[in-house]
Amino acid sequence: MAKGYWVGRVDVTNPEAYKNYVAANGVAFAKFGGRFLVRGGTFEAVIGSSRARNVVIEFPSYDQAIACWHSPEYQAARAKQEGGAEIDLIVIEGYDGVQPGGA
């Protein structure tokens, strides 16, 4: 079964408000098996647009990733953000097929 991922691009506009969200979101991520693969970090936008911060969260499945988004726990954390960030986020199914080189 393919994993599920949240891929987010974030511009924090109010760091104090955003801290409230960060302090609360771990409850939902833990409940649905989410784990950070990327959380900030140095990056180079080599083509197209970008935001100041990037996040990739892996879930055991696409269904778990979607369920986390819709969960009361995550929505409560999101409400604590109080407009502290501009966010682009997709939830996407991972790929389990053949890789380059046939591996």
Image (cartoon, rainbow, N blue to C red):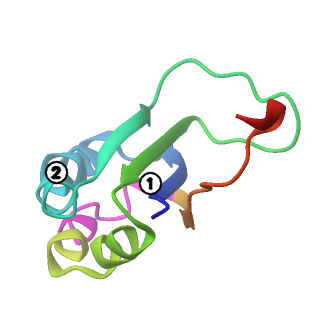
Question: Residue drawn at (31%, 82%), measured in percent from left and top?
Answer: 70
83 lies left or right of 56: left
Task: Give the residue displayed 37% in from the left and 46% down from the top.
Answer: 14
Packing grade of label 1 (10 A; few <14, some 14-19, many >=20) is some
The answer to which of 83 and 57 lies nearer the viewer is 57
Answer whether residue 62 is magenta in the image. no
Give the alpha-carbon distance from disc 1 to disc 2, as whole Å: 17 Å
Tell me which segment is drawn in magenta: 77-86
Front one among 99 and 92: 99
* Front-lying residue, 55 or 15: 55
Image quarter where the N terminus lies is: bottom left
Name the amino acid, label 2: Gly
Residue 62 percent location from the top left of the image:
44, 69
Is residue 29 placed above or below 70 in the rendered structure?
A: above
Q: Tell me whether the residue at label 1 lies in contact with that at label 2, contact meaning CB atoms closer than 8 angstroms.
A: no
| Residue that numbered label 2 is attached to | 26
**Residue on which disc 1 sits:** 85
Tag 2's secondary structure? Answer: helix
Residue 94 % position (x, y): 56, 57
Q: Earlier in the sequence, mark 1 or mark 2?
A: 2
Decide: few, some or many residues near mark 2? Use Cα within 10 Å; few <14, some 14-19, many ≥20. some
Quadrant of the image containing the C terminus: top right
Q: Which mark is residue 100?
A: none
Q: Is residue 100 above or below residue 75?
A: above
- State the image quarter where residue 43 is shown: top right
Q: Nearer the viewer, residue 85 or 29?
A: 29
Residue flagged by tag 1: what amino acid is it?
Answer: Ala
Q: Measuring 68% from the left and 54% from the top, which residue is drawn there? A: 97
Image point (57%, 65%), residue name? 92
